[in-house]
Amino acid sequence: MKLVMKLISYGVSAALILYIGITLLAPQLTMDIFGFRSFIVVSPSMVPDINVYDMIFITDVEESDLEIDDIITFSVYIPEVDQVSFVTHYIGDIQTQTGDDTIYKTHGANFEEGDSFDDWEDKDGNPIDITFDDIEGEYQFKIPYVGYLVTMLRDPIFLGLLAINGTIIYFLVKTVKKTFLNKDNEKKESE
């Protein structure tokens, strides 16, 4: 029984290390290799359904499976950060054009009837539509607040402080153990 538990533990650890390694080195491959991909939410556009610092997981989706009110993650230019990034929003409308790509109109969680859908632009400020080629996957579930930890672990200053504190704790434990061993040896010798 212990052997089985040990093997399971090693297997899970190896898979986790492999996932983290691929996520850090080649994030675009995680969907192909594992069948899912994770993201840390950095904007409040989906509150209260998905909060800032939640870790969300998406899976690949077939275009024919997409429906209004599905939550999708797609890539689009974000002017505030001046780069293409991933956004997770609801599908508000699906517009099928004859001869053209299907267009997906999206919106955040606080959308009310009568509001307009999201307006997306390219880097030059030209309006664009979200098509299936832009969609990375469909939202499956979230792990609340894991993003806090992930964000801290990506910070080099935090990692440096963690390493320094870990080293200090290691030497403190080693010194305390050595002190107690010396006291035990002195007691035995005096008896």
Image: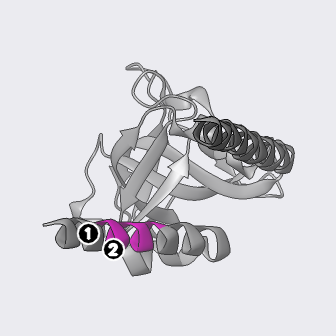
Between 172 and 119, the one lying in front of the other is 172
- Amino acid marked by disc 1: Ile
Q: Residue at x 84, y 57 (%)?
A: 124
Dot 1: within a 10 Å radius of its alpha carbon, few (fewer than 14), some, or many (20 or more) residues? few
Element type at mark 1: helix
Residue bounds of the magenta highlight: 9-16
Residue positioned most to the front: 191
Q: Quick check: marks 2 and 1 in contact, CB under 8 Å?
A: yes
Q: Residue at x 37, y 20 (%)?
A: 113
Packing grade of label 2 (10 A; few <14, some 14-19, many >=20) is few
| Residue 145 spot, x, y in % from top left | 51, 32
Q: Give the secondary structure at mark 2.
A: helix
Identity, as a three-letter code, of the amino acid under mark 2: Gly
Q: Residue 15 colored magenta?
A: yes
Q: Is residue 90 visible?
A: yes
Task: Give the residue number, with chain letter if any, for mark 2.
Answer: 11
Question: Residue at (80%, 58%) from the top-left corner?
Answer: 123
Confirm whether the magenta stretch covers residue 96: no
**Is residue 23 depicted above or below 128 in this figure?**
below
| Location of mark 1 (residue) | 8
- Distance from the alpha carbon under mark 2 to that under mark 1: 5 Å
Task: Assign the C terminus to one quadrant of the image.
Answer: top right
Question: Residue furthest toward the left?
Answer: 1
Give the prevailing secondary structure in the magenta stretch: helix
Q: Residue at x 30, y 40 (%)?
A: 69
